[in-house]
Amino acid sequence: MAVSKPPEKAACLRAYPNMASRWALALFLLLPLLAGAETTPPFVYADKAGVQFTVTADGLTAITLAGRTVAKGNWHAVNADWINKAPGKVNIGKILDKSMTVLDNHSVLVRQRYPDAEVTFRYTFAGEDVTIKAKVENTHPTESIQVIGFQGLQLSWQTPPQGMLPCMHGSWLVAHPGQFFHPSMDNKIGGTYGADATLGVGASPLNATLLPTITMWDYADWTPVNANKNSREFCPRRNLQYFVAQTIEPESARTFGFQIRVSANTDWRHLLQPYKEYFTTLLGPVRYQADPRPIIQMCANKSVQYITPQNPYGYHDGWMRLDQKEGVQQFCDQLIPLLKSVNGQGVIIWGQQGSEPRGAEYRPDFDVLPPETEANWVTLQARFHDAGLKLGVATRPDSMPIRLDWKSDGLVNLNPDDPGQMEMLWARFKHMIDKGCTLFYMDCFGMRIEDVKIARFLREKMGPNILTFSEMSCDAILPYTGLYLEVGFHGDDVKDPENAGNIAWLSAQQWEIMRWLVPGISTAARPHIADKDSKTGNYYRWMLERRMTPLEQPWQTQAGALPLKALLPVYFDEKGQWKKND
């Protein structure tokens, strides 16, 4: 049976045919929008160097270099609370609607709405670079976002890329929540890059303050290796991801920045230049006056088992008995002439308190000395001051001791945002500075963003003329403290001089990048060498060429005094500074 239209509507259509046509046309134009299809043409930015970026309402969707597509996908936001083992209740999953607004010929806005969030991306293009500012609005009424993530772009090289491409399996991240964020021991440098013979890609955080971030270059294929398949390292494709750990409270917003450089220039300095500019703006240059001259390391403490009625503090015997007047006199008689013979700057004493039965080999209460050592310190301070040499001690500035039971102590991490805790820490350093100390080794320090804040606090208190050396390393701590390094040297066993040595916990390129990022950083590098190398002093040249200050036990310094003294004029000027700037 045919169903006729209501008479009044049919009459209306007959009376106003133009209106019907207009409704039909409007419906035709509206249908694609209702279906979620995109009608705005893509925004394309092309650089003279041959780089081309394409943006749609899906985000950054393609990058080409010299006509070849080197990246494709759709840059978008995700809830990454899983990295910190949080439930991630704010839904940033399916995009409900999206739009793109072209601002001018080098910038565009993309808005994407999710069930519990709205993200506005501002893409700004300049030459080979795209800067992405993402304003994330958490629209959930009660839940926070702990870690925000951005992803969806896959980079493709022609051969497996080389460079600095951090990648960690998700299972590891979950098992070690928060540990892989930069700055940390596991993620030392915030800028990253990858390159083959024709394509270089660099990426950098671009936030207003120092925040914990991960720039991840996830393998495109994690399939296990088998007889017919190479390992994932041979895959030339990487999925770019960027994570920031900062709380976004319910019904509030924060903005995060990221920068990508795509270039035919594959030199790492060129690819990391945006990161260096960001780093310098955010953290600045070194805040201390470096002194590259040799240092002597003295380990005064032996062990708890060595404590006896005759040695109540477990010191080494002889001239390391800081609790005895004759021991301190011998200490000065031995070390002062040795330091003078190699134009050394001073000594750092490890275990100045002796051995503590309650635990912690190098303790946070490093300024609390045995009464006898306290009394003898006046002599130590005067002798080194009169000789124009520096005196230093080992510290542990990341924590404070607590009593676990009647016989043992534990440690609690210091909170750099607690003024009371920071003043307590500064009082310990001030106590030893008043005792003549201007060199400080920082044990178990430099592994957390909190350590960077502590180092900055201490540097502001100390001024530029006191040197500190952090045992662990990350780039963000370098403006405030020098680094303690441990160097392995293989001598004549290795034909290639470049590979004759290595740095513990730090690759050769990481060290090169750190020196490039922050010219003028100071080091105290302890070499691990064979007896024959100690006599020849070959390792000195390898270290000095890499701007490393030798930090040695007295007997090693004594054995290498002549070759070291011969090399000093090659690398140091008459003021004891490096002849060539970094």
Image (cartoon, helix red, strand yellow):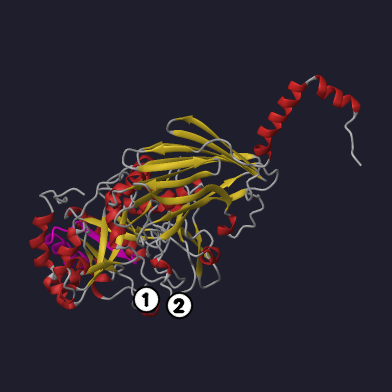
Q: In the current view of this chain or complex, which residue is farthest to the top?
A: 15
Could you tell me if residue 378 is visible in this image? Answer: no
Amino acid at the residue labelled 2: Asn
User: Dividing the image into 4 quarters, which one contains the N terminus?
Assistant: top right
Magenta stretch, residue numbers: 331-352
Mark 2 or 1, nearer chain start: 2
Q: In this image, 101 relative to 478: left or right?
A: right
Q: Is residue 344 magenta?
A: yes
- Name the spot of residue 375 as percent of width and height, x first: 32, 61
Amino acid at the residue labelled 1: Ser
Q: Nearer the viewer, residue 137 or 556?
A: 137
Q: Nearer the viewer, residue 151 or 243?
A: 151
Q: Nearer the viewer, residue 39 or 11?
A: 11
Circle 1 crowding by C-alpha within 10 Å: few under 14, some 14–19, many from 20: some
Q: Residue at x 11, y 50 (%)?
A: 573
Q: In the current view of this chain or complex, which residue is farthest to the front?
A: 1
Does 492 appear above or below 205? below
Q: In this image, 401 relative to 291: left or right?
A: right
- Name the spot of residue 319 as percent of width and height, x first: 23, 71
Quadrant housing residue 161? bottom left
Pointer 2 residue: 226
- Name the spot of residue 334 as percent of width and height, x first: 17, 67
Pointer 1 residue: 303
Q: Secondary structure at mark 1?
A: loop
Q: Nearer the viewer, residue 138 or 506?
A: 138
Q: Residue at x 73, y 27 (%)?
A: 23
Quadrant housing residue 390? bottom left
Q: Is residue 216 magenta?
A: no
